[in-house]
Image (spheres, coloured by chain):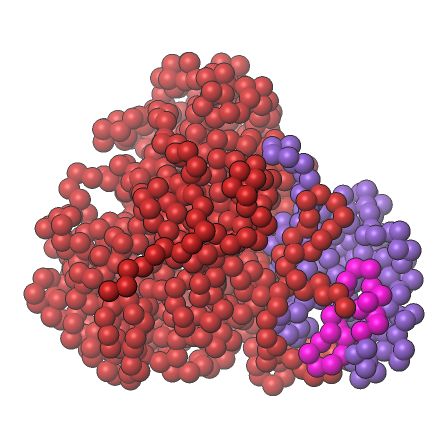
Amino acid sequence: MRYAMAIDTKKCVGCSDCVVACQTENFVPIGYCRDWVVEIVDGTYPQLEMEIRSERCCHCENAPCVRCCPTGASHISDGGTVLVKPNKCIGCGACIASCPYDARYPHPDGHVDKCTFCLHRVKQGLDPACVAACPTKCMYFGDLDNPRSDISMALKKRKWKTLIPEAGTNPQLYYLI
Amino acid sequence: MTNRRQFIKITTSGIGGLLLGGGMAAANRFFVPGTDPEELSIDLTRTPTYCEVCFWKCAGWVYKTSEGKIWKIIGNDDDQHSNGRFCPRGTGGVGMYFDEDRLKTPLIRTEERGSQSFREASWEEAFNYIAEKMKSIATEHGPECIALLTHGSGGEYFGHLLKAFGSGSIAAPSYSQCRGPREVAFFSTFGEGVMSPERTDIRDTKCLVLIGSHIGENMHNGQVQEMSDAIDKGTSIITVDPRFSVAAGKSKYWLPIKPATDLALLLAWMHVLIYEERYDKNYVEEYTFGFEQLKEHVRNKTPEWAYGITTIEPDLIRKSAREMANAAPAVIVHPGRHVTWYGDDTQRERAIAMLNALLGSWGRRGGYYNPESVTIPQWPHPGYPAPRRTWKDAFPDKYTLASSSLASGICDATIPAVSEACNFKGWIVNGTNLIHTFPDQKNTINAIQNLDLMVVVDTMPMDITGWADVVLPECTYLERYDSLRHSPHRKPAIALRMPATEPLYNTKPAWWMAQELAKRLGLEAYFTWKDMEELLDWQLKQLDSSLDEMQRIGVKTYERSWEDLYMTEGEELEFLTNTGKIELYSTEFQEAGFDPMPVFTAHEEPPEGFYRLIYGRAPMHTFSRTSNNPNLTDLMDENKVWVNPKVAKLWGLEQDQVVYLENQDGVRSKFPVKVRVTERIRWDSVYIVHGFGNDNKKLSRSHGRGASDADLITRVHIDPIMGGTGMRGNFVTFKFEPEQTLVS
């Protein structure tokens, strides 16, 4: 089992519903977020192009945050999901510094927090909160080992990219372009 | 340590990425300390609601934590408005409940109007105060001199109360400040309006044409969802906008039009369709009236003619017209929603309606469908007394085709100078922040200062509450019952809103307020139901349901009863117009003394050093209604003024530099606003998101954040046909100091 997420940049409108849905689902304190939206504009008026995408932890196969964690709080869990055990985390911030995607934040309670792929929902057969809420249905989540999962199909049909591939982290967050 | 929770994120490509989500603020109460993500479980206690953050009214479920605290709101899968998915505002609706700045108890004014100075009062005292004033206004001037201005569910009960009292002046700004012109234009063309939710069949369209409509930033849920589905299916989108909107970024053709010239483009598109014989000939022959007149009318309206006006190249006008024709009849030239722009808006919307008629999209799959709604049984009550006058009497022979009451008309008729025929002496304002809703704030305040009674019903201390004599604090939609939602859609359906929790503070639902006021006005006979549970159950039992069932399912969808979703080919049809046909030549307009076919007139252009002020929406906010919502301000807590880099260079403006905007009449924005230098806006315009620049210190997260476009819209171009307030004929320049105030 290899969990992954794909986001269709052709459909994303940048509404940030994924951000609020994550915040409420996961009790993320106001002022912090596990996912966020980026807008990139290229060109000069009126020859313009724009990409909008929702970003979060890439749940890297080769995760620098896990390698550098001194206590083992950051670890690889079911389906390759990268998680933090709050009670083992000492809040040293090494993982935050090591993440090329800037996907982790220091939780005011003293531990580091980040996207969990909503594993608690996934275990019950539900999509992650962001995927389930997205009004444009631009996000796909599933198991890459299953060739017929939504995500496997989406990656087969469409061109895609990952972010900062040169970091060698092998991210499991894909962008359909 | 890097911290990505900063608004500007530096990226390696392009001009730079803008972080739209996230933000910095204080920690909040939600946190469940130290929860291991691997040990979280899901709680399934839920109650149905429909959303009140905007008026798409998506139905969903409110979930609570095991401690009984409101947790999250999720769409109801059976709901046609949401299809189980809420927009960010709906998801962030929990913030309306948790906002600690909420109105908490009834208030009575202690100092002059506008100062936000109140003392706390009991409900009893507040109701007695209002009832006494209403009675004295009725005695002195007549009951029809009290008006209701409303934009929210509670309007229904206060409307019922006022009609029982003897007033017929009940208006929503969503008509005269928003979508009124399109309703009048479509009525005069097809004999029916566009309605809300719009009857646009975006799901099945092959070509979607957006004219200034920014779906995706305007988050009306069903339309955004269907646009996304359409993108999946390869639908081509054509966007006409001086701003590179999100939709423009997803378009096959973006027409970066010079603002205020859309009508010229529409006439040229009709010219291409007619003179290249690309219109739907059978449909036009069978169903329309006035084709020959239209053909003559647009004879000279060539793309070359339009080029000189719109700056859109003739080739692009032709190509985009052919794109529509190739998709027809599965094509939607979208009427938009907020369409009160330049004062000739009904005519522009007429041109849109006519273009749809030429393409044969009205009543066709992928065009416009026939919606159906459920009729809700009315609890028996005595007949309403006929009001002796209404707002219309203040405007003899004006706005003759207005199909609903004009909120701005009521406002103007409150100022004695306008007319002696019907002056208003009392306003009940429900859920609408009129200071930011109406253009020309001085005019609004002048009207309010002429009132004997001003009541505001709201959940939040908005700018308008400062002008109230009495403030009635409503509990949020998560804490109350309301009437059944029964908006038209592909299938008729109803949705229930019920309280997920007890109201916080000393807040109450609007239905209870209206009922209590009725008791003090001797109008008990109009409110004989015990409470909403009794009323709803009585209504639902006649709709083959019950309150008990609806509490479990939230949404009930019925089979269609009266006609097909689409016309059938060759079907004989009579339209509800004078001629029984789709009127390309409007006999109604002709009889009323208006151009029967739209004529392009040039609008004023910005003077040197000024830029046209364009405003719009951000997906995470509904005007000022959400501007203090803790969850939504976390996503966006101020607006910025979008400035083209060429203009920025000219003025030496830098990213995030703070400026003031001053309009052509010398009115300066109350608060400073940050500059967003972006290629996404034309050089002759600036853009801000509506709903910011609130001037109430009681709004701890939104006071003084950003600029209010309403501050700067002092020049209003009124649509002579239906009284809509055109608000895009204002121009602003940059100032670097606040307005000097004289110290006496």
Q: Nearer the viewer, residue B655 or B153?
A: B655
Camera sees residue B572 = no
Q: Residue furthest left?
A: B140
Q: Nearer the viewer, residue B515 or B240?
A: B240
Residue at x-position 88% and y-position 74% = A69
Residue B673 falls inside the magenta stretch: no
Camera sees residue A104 = yes
Is the C terminus of chain B in the top left, top right, bottom left or bottom right quadrant? bottom left
Residue at x-position 12% and y-position 66% = B138
The relative height of residue B726 versus residue A1 in the rendered view (above or below) is above
Residue B592: x and y, percent? 23, 31
Residue B661: x and y, percent? 43, 49
Chain A, hue in figure: purple
Rendered red, the chain in question is B
Q: Nearer the viewer, residue B364 or B539?
A: B364
Is the N terminus of chain B in the top left, top right, bottom left or bottom right quadrant? bottom right
The relative height of residue B296 versus residue A171 in the rendered view (above or below) is above
Left or right, B176 with respect to B137, comes to right
Residue at x-position 41% and y-position 72% = B698
Residue B64: x and y, percent? 59, 78
Residue range in magenta is A93-113
